[in-house]
Image: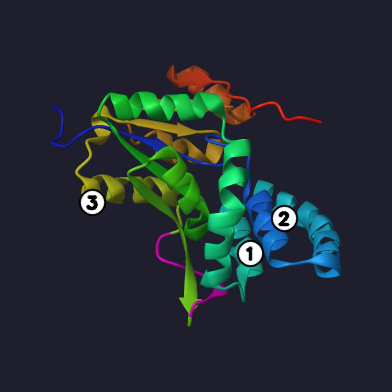
Amino acid sequence: MTSPGKAAAFFDVDGTLAATNVLIVFASLQRHRLRGTRWAMWFLWFAIRAFWFLFLDLYDRRLFNERFVQNYRGVTLQEIASWQTTSAPAFWAARLFPEAASEVRQHRAAGRAVVILSGGMAPMLETLVRLLGADALYATKPEMVDGRLTGRLVGTHPVNEGKAAVIKNAAADLGIALDASYAYADHYTDRFFLETVAHPVAVNPSRRLKALAAERGWRVCRWKAKPTMA
């Protein structure tokens, strides 16, 4: 029996909607915040640290997110708002998969709600939400004090099993029937999220997710970024 409510399409962001990851998004913000030698020095430090972050992500995605958000300590909401209105539109437009944008449009035309569900930082995704015309955003919430990020998180962290909990809460909030809905993600740790809906879709799947999708008979998509000019 179908539960009451409308159907929705839930989309992960990094590697699913766009050729991005949390490191690239943060670097774009820092490029906007810093100038000259400050940017060059920060970028050198960050490039070295990136190897550690990538290793940590492979080891434990939840721990990675908790550690990585500490980089935002001291960033102000005003700085993020400035990035959103100046740099972010071009940043997301250049990295959004055209096939993903088309899929979003098809769901909207069919009358389904479009929900962005990501372990990324919510304030950094708001421009993407507007660009796609999504109905809602559920993402990592940073702690803020006096308009400044503390480097800590608040609320349920939407990664691993936490993403499945968030999608169920989102369905209750928005009146969505999960047994008529779609979900799109790229990583094996997203399997909990994908299993909550009737129509899971593995996008650019990792090796383990690809195997799971084949085992379960899930749809698999290969979406590519737009070619860039040299």
> Does residue 85 appear to the left or right of 32 in the view shown?
left
Residue that appears at 44% across and 20% down: 218
Q: Which residue is mark 3?
A: 173
Residue 149 in magenta?
yes
Residue that appears at 62% across and 25% down: 224
SS assignment for the magenta stretch, majority: strand
Q: Which residue is mark 1?
A: 67
Viewer can see residue 198: no
Instruction: Quarter of the image for the N terminus: give it.
Output: top left
Rendered image: mark on residue 53? 2
> Does residue 165 appear to the left or right of 59 in the view shown?
left
What is the secondary structure assignment of the residue under circle 3?
Answer: helix
> Does residue 183 appear to the left or right of 113 in the view shown?
right
Amino acid beneath label 1: Arg
Instruction: Quarter of the image for the C terminus: give it.
Output: top right
Image spot of residue 86 (x, y percent) = 59, 55
Give 3 or 39, whichever is nearer the viewer: 39
Q: What span is in magenta? A: 147-156
- Give the spatial CA distance, label 2 vs label 1: 9 Å
In the rendered image, the vertical position of residue 221 relative to residue 65, given as above or below: above
Residue that appears at 63% across and 42% down: 20
Earlier sequence position, callout 2 versus callout 3: 2
Tag nearer the camera, 2 or 3: 3
Q: Are marks 1 and 3 in contact (CB under 8 Å)?
A: no
In the rendered image, the vertical position of residue 94 relative to residue 118, given as above or below: above
What is the secondary structure assignment of the residue under circle 2?
Answer: helix
Amino acid beneath label 2: Phe
